[in-house]
Image: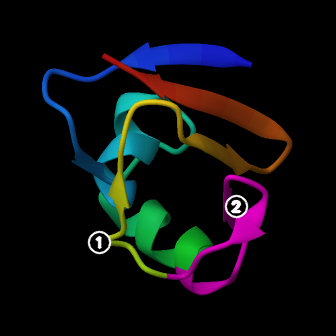
């Protein structure tokens, strides 16, 4: 699992997927989230605007990244 640093104490799920290189485009983020392919802290989350905080772990298509400051 990679650690991906964010510049503040919160980032939205769709933005984090792109920042962490888990997906390539915002459109792709919208699709994988809507399809239920994204897990946050081990649970499927279909909210693109979900707020992530340091310590949260995001997984998609077998790749995962942890939010850190």
Q: Is residue 29 left or right of residue 14?
A: right
| x, y percent for residue 15 | 29, 49
Which quadrant of the rendered structure holds the N terminus?
Answer: top right
| x, y percent for residue 40 | 63, 57
Residue at the disc numbered 1: 49
Does the stretch in magenta take in 36? yes
| x, y percent for residue 19 | 35, 31
Q: Is residue 6 left or right of residue 18?
A: left
| x, y percent for residue 41 | 68, 52
Range drawn in magenta: 34-46
Task: Tell which of 38 and 68 is nearer to you.
Answer: 68
Residue at image point 52% right, 45% down? 23
Residue at image point 70% right, 61% down? 39
Q: Is residue 23 left or right of residue 51?
A: right
Task: Tell which of 8 and 16 is nearer to you.
Answer: 8
Residue at the disc numbered 2: 39
């Amino acid at each position: 699992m990679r650690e991906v640093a964010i510049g503040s104490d919160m980032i939205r799920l769709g933005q984090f997927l792109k920042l962490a290189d888990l997906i390539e485009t915002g459109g792709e983020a919208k699709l994988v989230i809507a399809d239920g392919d994204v897990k946050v802290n081990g649970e499927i989350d279909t909210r693109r605007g979900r707020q992530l905080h340091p310590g949260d772990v995001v997984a998609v298509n077998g790749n995962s990244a942890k939010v850190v400051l």
